[in-house]
């Protein structure tokens, strides 16, 4: 109530403040819309609308999902909270992921690392003996990431990590005022200098991983966490759901030092 209407209850349909409380708990009626018999609860228009589950259960799932470093599987959440079916736990988790606020639109500044990676497609479902034979990037999904050290991370799933995709991603997410844009020697980054970035590369091919402050170790740690989480917790990630998992992992990363992450998530889940 406080987060949704900090200055008092307003009609969820027309925004009027001329509303009155009904006798039923959590029900208001609008003086403007009353001819249509419009009544509303604070949950109307939020991800919690039409839910059969009490809000405290939602909040517990949100807590478990967002406070564990690598994420938590629907199965584990189902067991810990004693939720009736796996399907229910799974759908609660997915609705929460979809309600997470996307990473801020502000361009990354400071010392920025950019790296492309491949996320394991359906590999996790195969029997262990077969997994290692999957070579290179077959069946995997390319993801681009940019991370500002001591700042935010942003990610994006792409069709092919070619020059166009990499250049487009950097220009859309990284400020030209960034002190440094560090990448590996992937040819797709070769026009960044021409585009006005202070771009430096580390030559992984030649065994070079750190050159002063030029390295990509922070974004590599982020990818490692993501991959361990996806493999250990979710087993199977399809192209359809990968953006949701990325959103979960970036939300956790970007809100690590934020004591108000829960309110931030709730405000975002209100759909405004
Ligand atoms: Zn109204």
Image (spheres, rainbow, N blue to C red):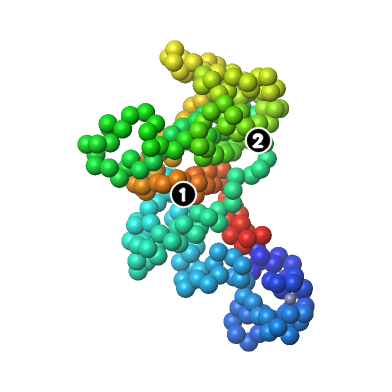
User: Relative to 37, is 189 above or below?
Assistant: above
Quarter holding residue 123: top left
Question: Residue at coordinates 46% horizontally, 15% vertically from top-left?
Answer: 208
Quarter holding residue 189: top right
Dot in front, 1 or 2? 1
- Point out the residue furthest to the left here: 129
User: Relative to 255, is 118 above or below?
Assistant: above
Mark 1: which secondary structure?
A: loop
Question: Residue at coordinates 68% horizontally, 40% vertically from top-left?
Answer: 106
Left or right, residue 123 beside residue 92: left
Counting labels gives 2
Q: Mark 2 points at which residue?
A: 172
Q: Where is residue 48 in the image (x, y as percent from the top left)?
A: 54, 67
The residue carrying pointer 1 sits among few (fewer than 14), some (14 to 19) or many (20 or more) residues within 10 Å by Cα, namely: few
Q: Are marks 1 and 2 in contact (CB under 8 Å)?
A: no
The residue lying toward the viewer, choosing from 239 and 220, is 239
Q: Position of residue 25 (x, y in %)?
A: 59, 82
Q: Position of residue 192 (x, y in %)?
A: 63, 22
Mark 2: which secondary structure?
A: helix
Question: Residue at coordinates 70% horizontally, 72% vertically from top-left?
Answer: 13
Left or right, residue 196 beside residue 212: right
The residue lying toward the viewer, choosing from 240 and 260, is 240
Q: Name the residue under label 1.
A: 240
């Amino acid at each position: 109530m406080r987060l949704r209407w900090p200055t008092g209850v307003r009609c969820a349909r027309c925004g009027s403040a001329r509303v009155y409380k009904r006798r039923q708990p959590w029900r208001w009626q609008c003086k403007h819309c009353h001819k249509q018999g419009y009544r509303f609860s604070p949950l109307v228009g939020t991800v919690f609308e039409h839910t059969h589950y009490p809000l405290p259960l939602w909040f517990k799932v949100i807590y478990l999902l967002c406070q564990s470093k690598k994420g938590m599987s629907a199965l584990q959440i189902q067991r810990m909270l004693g939720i009736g079916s796996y399907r229910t736990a799974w759908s609660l988790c997915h609705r929460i992921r979809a309600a997470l606020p996307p990473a801020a639109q502000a361009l990354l500044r400071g010392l920025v690392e950019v790296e492309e990676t491949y996320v394991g497609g359906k590999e996790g479902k195969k029997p262990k003996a077969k997994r290692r034979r999957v070579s290179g990037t077959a069946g995997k999904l390319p993801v681009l990431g940019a991370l500002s050290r001591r700042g935010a991370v942003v990610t994006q799933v792409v069709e092919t990590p070619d020059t166009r995709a990499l250049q487009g991603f950097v220009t859309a997410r990284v400020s030209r005022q960034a002190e440094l844009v560090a990448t590996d020697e992937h040819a797709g980054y070769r026009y960044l200098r021409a585009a006005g970035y202070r771009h430096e590369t580390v030559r992984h091919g030649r065994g070079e991983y750190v050159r002063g402050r030029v390295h990509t170790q922070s974004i590599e740690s982020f990818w490692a966490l993501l991959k361990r989480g996806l493999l250990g917790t979710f087993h199977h990630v399809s192209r359809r759901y990968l953006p949701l998992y990325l959103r979960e992992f970036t939300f956790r990363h970007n809100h690590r030092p934020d004591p108000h992450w829960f309110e931030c998530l709730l405000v975002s889940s209100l759909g405004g």
